[in-house]
Image (cartoon, rainbow, N blue to C red):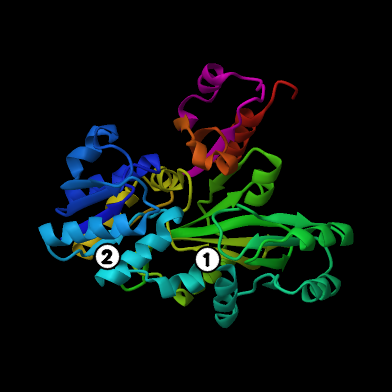
Amino acid sequence: MNVVFVSPNFPPTYFHFCTSLHRAGVNVLGIGDAHYDQLRPELRDALTEYYRVETMADYGAMLRACGYFTHKYGKIDRIESHTEFWLGIDAQLREDFNVFGQRPRDLESNRRKTGMKRRFVQAGIPCAEGMPAEDSEEVRRFAWRYGYPLIFKPDQGVGAGGAFKVSGDEELEAALENLPEGYVVERALQGDLLSFDGLTDRRGKIVFWTVHHFSGGIMETVNERRHLHYYSYRDLPEGIVELGRRAVAAFEVRERFFHVEFFREDSAKYFALEINVRPPGGFTLDMMNYACDIDLFQWWADLVAHDRTDFRFERKHHVAHASRRNGISYRLDHDKLLEELGPLVVAHMEIPQALSDAMGDYAYLLRSPDLEQIQAAVSTVEETSEG
């Protein structure tokens, strides 16, 4: 079996996908812009061959790389990066080489906000009212109908990039005067942000699922440089699980990870925000592994290589991501923090600059079966010297 893995060295922990594929007996063929000697040794050992391109944004170069692999190794069976930045290129390469998985037509519904909203509505999943922000008069009527605040965001964007909030008529007029093409406007949702995250097999059956609770919206975190933390549940709220399962079925997620975001109002009323048909961001895969003492990197590789379906898991722990930002003075420095939290800290690492706007500059992964202990530890991580 030949699997082309795009950008095998980034995000930093995604080399585990390649080492897991190698253990599953797969020919792992890497394409990336890093020099070969910059790849970590475990990754180099897992790759059957590595094709370097100057930039992965050059589709012609990516096409030639896959053509070379086809000529040398035969038919390509899978093409994957698991990364938001390369979803479009992955899909087009699958189209051009007739490979199983998402194609460009699929991205119209699961990458564009307008396509997501149509699919949510068709599936009977509540979501925020919204519309393309193409006609200024229509947008003004939308504001009159639903009131403020409103959220403007790119129809096709990465994370919260380019999103902003409008809270009154004057801000609305300023936004309309300078609004780029390809934006949508939505009624702002209030409440808690939660996500339904997991993995499906080749037929679309969910083989792993969990729920995470976020400290705030990613847009506010980025725009206001807030601390971000989020944690997993052991006992999952039933409402979000039912809607999450319905969303995964509606978007026909097959042999892929998923991340479905919901706002929860009044403790039990959920509204779908968006779906990402890829692993949840940052170090969330590692968090899910720590929560259940499993290896989702290997699970995915075994799904691909052997169509494995006999997975079992137990949610043993809550696991949290708590972050710090550069330039802020904290009550406890790094060493004292590790000393105080002790075994609650299962991992800590710098966050790559490409992810730091949303995720913070340094991450601590915290684990405990007791949610109150996790929440207290998160507070300790975030506590500044000013209290």
Residue 370: image x %, image y %? 54, 41
Q: Choose top left, top right, bottom left or bottom right for residue 84.
A: bottom left
Going from N to C along the chain, the mark reached first, 1 or 2, is: 1
- Image x and y of residue 353, in percent: 51, 36
Q: Are marks 1 and 2 in contact (CB under 8 Å)?
A: no
**Whole-percent x and y of residue 178?**
75, 58
Q: Which residue is mark 1?
A: 241
Image quarter for residue 65? bottom left
Q: Determine whether, in the image, residue 83 is placed left or right of residue 34.
A: right
Q: Residues within 10 Å of mark 2 (few under 14, many from 20)?
A: some
Q: Amino acid at mark 1?
A: Val
Compare residues 84 and 248 and report the one nearer the observer.
84
Q: Nearer the viewer, residue 96 or 219?
A: 96
Task: Give above or below for 372 relative to 332.
Answer: below
Quadrant of residue 133 within the rendered picture? bottom right
**Horizontal arrangement in the rendering, residue 18 relative to residue 377 (left or right):** left
| Bounds of the magenta segment | 317-346
Would you say residue 264 sits in the magenta stretch? no
Q: Quadrant of the N terminus?
A: bottom left
Badge 2 marks a residue whose secondary structure is: loop
Q: Secondary structure at mark 1?
A: helix
Q: Residue at x 34, y 51 (%)?
A: 296
Q: Nearer the viewer, residue 103 or 311?
A: 103
Mark yes or no: residue 331 visible: yes
**Crowd tier of the residue under label 1, counting other residues whose Cα lies within 10 Å: few below 14, some 14–19, many 20 or above:** some
Q: Residue at x 62, y 66 (%)?
A: 182
Residue 336 sits inside the magenta stretch: yes
Quarter of the C terminus within the rendering:
top right
What type is the residue that disc 2 sits on?
Answer: Thr
The residue under label 2 is: 309
